[in-house]
Amino acid sequence: MENKKEIQVRSRHLDGAEISWFAPICNGDDEFLGERSMQYKSNWENASNILLTADKLGYRNILCPSSYQVGQDTMTFASAVAPLTKNINLLAAIRCGEVHPPMLGRAIATLDHILKGRLTINIISSNLPGTELGSAERYQRSREVIEILKQGWTQDFIDFKGEYYNIQLKTDPVKPYQQNGGPLLYFGGYSPPGVELCAQHCDVYLMWPETETKIYGLMSNMSEKAATYNRTVDFGLRVHVIVREKEDEARAYAQRLMSKLEAEHGKEIRERALDAKSYGVARQATMREIADDEGYAEPHLWTGIGRARSGCGAALVGDPDQIVAKIKRYMDMGIRSFIFSGYPHLDECNLFAKYVLPQLKTLSMPIEQGRIPTEEPMSPLGAGIRT
């Protein structure tokens, strides 16, 4: 794809990318989509094994998602696994409004110290269980949470009054390990209020897989919106992957993955999620509609997974050279963060590390953005914390 103009990207100068994996703590791991097996149930043993394997294999970050209906609590899981990790960052998802912001800020700061600055945060603006807010209201609540968190991380006093929160509070207990603004904020959203929020406050704009032309459109729109705040953001792609030694093997595995899914069951799985009616999910459905008879929306971009998932609904499918070439095309567009996954997650984590990871230069976004201090800060719970 020939870009019409260069998109302003915060880290375009970097010649590597943050290559991340996915920790299925929300109970979505399977060998066949649509057929549950207790072998892959979300529990501490399975999910921590995947995360620690990704750490050993050289992945630079790992998404720990959030869901009320199924799986484990994100922050509890992340805190338990953090001391066991060696190099990998954790991308912990938080649902804004779920925890009172000063308490959330303290929890994040504590976890950041446990990880010695290897914490990143995925901002989620979905409705909370049992509540129903419009898009603009949800993103305004998220905006207020972010602004309070940033005050707590960077100032001595929180002084905030908004539509949802009115807080005046000293901030001694909530200083994170990362001293240059706190953990990086990753964000995914497509509606105008969501784009506005990311442009104003977040660091990495996460997109679900679409055709390269549509991804370029999303990036261009975000770049222009961020410029109105005199900011630039980085771009990330959350996508599944199936890589095999030969392309026909990868394509055959893709069909095997869906071989036990009944259409009605797939619909029920998609619609049970809290974000099932979001604009982003609708865009994934549109992509399936334009795909060919085998489910490919463009070469090596297979949409079949969306038949059984409400969110990220497509996978890169091919041999190692094809997958690497596709990733490098995305990098040429300006994408610097990738969150991959596959089914089953542990098997695909190993295969991607075998066939693809050695061919890519990887990096850590917090380090590249100067978030890690050069000297050890004091405890987040102590007085006289350096900022």
Image (cartoon, rainbow, N blue to C red):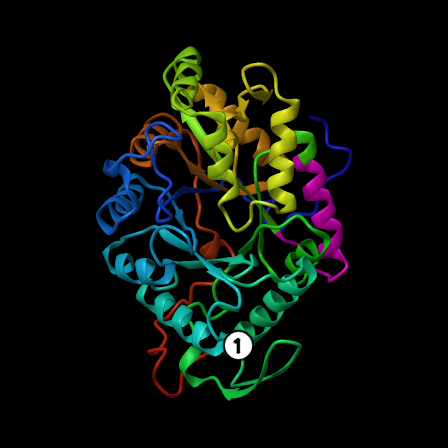
Q: Mark 1 sits on what residue? A: 154
Residue 35 placed where, x, y %? Answer: 34, 30
Task: Name the residue located 66 percent from the left edge and 67 percent from the top edge.
Answer: 140
State whether residue 211 appears in this view: no
State whether residue 153 appears in this view: yes
* Main secondary structure found in the magenta portion: helix
Which image quarter: residue 176?
Answer: bottom left
Left or right, residue 109 beside residue 192? left
Task: Name the residue located 68 percent from the left edge and 43 percent from the top edge.
Answer: 219
Please tell me whether residue 253 is drawn above or below residue 181 in the rendered image. Answer: above
Q: Quadrant of the N terminus?
A: top right
Residue 95 placed where, x, y %? Answer: 50, 61
Residue 11 placed where, x, y %? Answer: 58, 48
Q: Which residues are magenta?
A: 215-233
- How many residues crowd mark 1 within 10 Å: few (<14), some (14–19), many (20+)? some
Which image quarter: residue 232?
Answer: bottom right
- Label 1 SS: helix
Left or right, residue 44 beside residue 316? left
Residue 51 placed where, x, y %? Answer: 30, 46
